[in-house]
Image (spheres, rainbow, N blue to C red):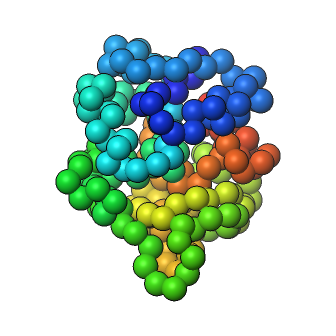
Amino acid sequence: MISIFDYGAGNLRSVENTLGAIGANYQLVRSPEEVRSSMKLILPGVGHFGQMMRAIDQLRVREALIEVIRKGVPFLGICLGLQALFEASEEAPDEHGLGIFKGHVKRFQGEMRIPHMGWNSLHRSKASRLLRGLGDHPYMYFANSYYAPVVRETAAACEYSLSFTAVLEKDNLFGVQFHPEKSGEAGLQIVRNFIES
C-alpha cells in the first residue's frame, strides 16, 4: 500500500491517477500516526514552499516525516516535495525545510523564461534505481521557478541556464524535481521503479 501525504494542496489527483494507471493500491494520509505507519510514502508538491511547510507544521507531521525517512521507509518527494527535503528556500526564507539535505533552494535568475515549464532531458551522474530502464537522458516534464542545488546525492541533473538537481537518491530516499505524473510512459516507469525499490 502506497501512502500519499495530503497537506491540502498539491497535485494529489494526478498522482492518484498515475498510481491507478499502474495498478498500485494507495491511500491518502494526513496524521502523524498515518505517516508513521506508511510502508511507502509519496510527498507530492505544487505551489508555494512556505504554504507547504506551514501546512506540514499545522498538521504536526514534520517529525513523523523525518522519522519515517530515517527509519528506512521508501519515500518519494515530487517537485516541491523534493525541495522540502532541503534546509530552506528563497521562496519563503522564514520557513524551514525538513533539512534532510544541506543547502538552500533558489530562484532561477537571468533572461530565460520563468517558470521553467515543459519537457527537458536528464543527465545522469551515477547509477539510479529510480531511472532504471530509462536510458541516460530521458525527457521529463518540469514546472518550476525554483531549483535545488546539485549535491552528493544527486543522481541526475537538468540544465536550465545552470545545472540543478532533477533526481535525488540516497538509500530509501528519492526525490524528483519534474512531474512523473505528467511525463508519459517514462514518468510511469519512474513511479513503478519507486514502488519496486
Please identify the quarter of the rendering in which residue 18 is found.
Answer: top right
Q: How many marks overall?
A: 0
Residue 179 spot, x, y in % from top left: 62, 49
Residue 108 spot, x, y in % from top left: 44, 73
| Residue farthest left in this picture | 94
Where is 33 relative to 114, above or below? above
Along the viewing direction, whichever of 118 and 83 lies nearer the viewer: 118
Q: Residue at x 42, y 31 (%)?
A: 7
Q: Residue at x 34, y 14 (%)?
A: 33
Along the viewing direction, whichever of 126 and 116 lies nearer the viewer: 116
Q: Quadrant of the C terminus?
A: top right
Where is 123 relative to 131, above or below? below
Residue 25 spot, x, y in % from top left: 65, 18
Where is 64 relative to 84, above or below? above
Please give left or right for residue 105 compared with residue 45 in the image.
Answer: left
Please give left or right for residue 60 compared with residue 124 in the image.
Answer: left
Along the viewing direction, whichever of 50 and 171 lies nearer the viewer: 50
Please give left or right for residue 85 compared with residue 137 in the image.
Answer: left
Residue 74 visible in image: no
Q: Residue at x 68, y 64 (%)?
A: 118
Q: Quadrant of the N terminus?
A: top right
Residue 108 visible in image: yes
Residue 176 spot, x, y in % from top left: 54, 51
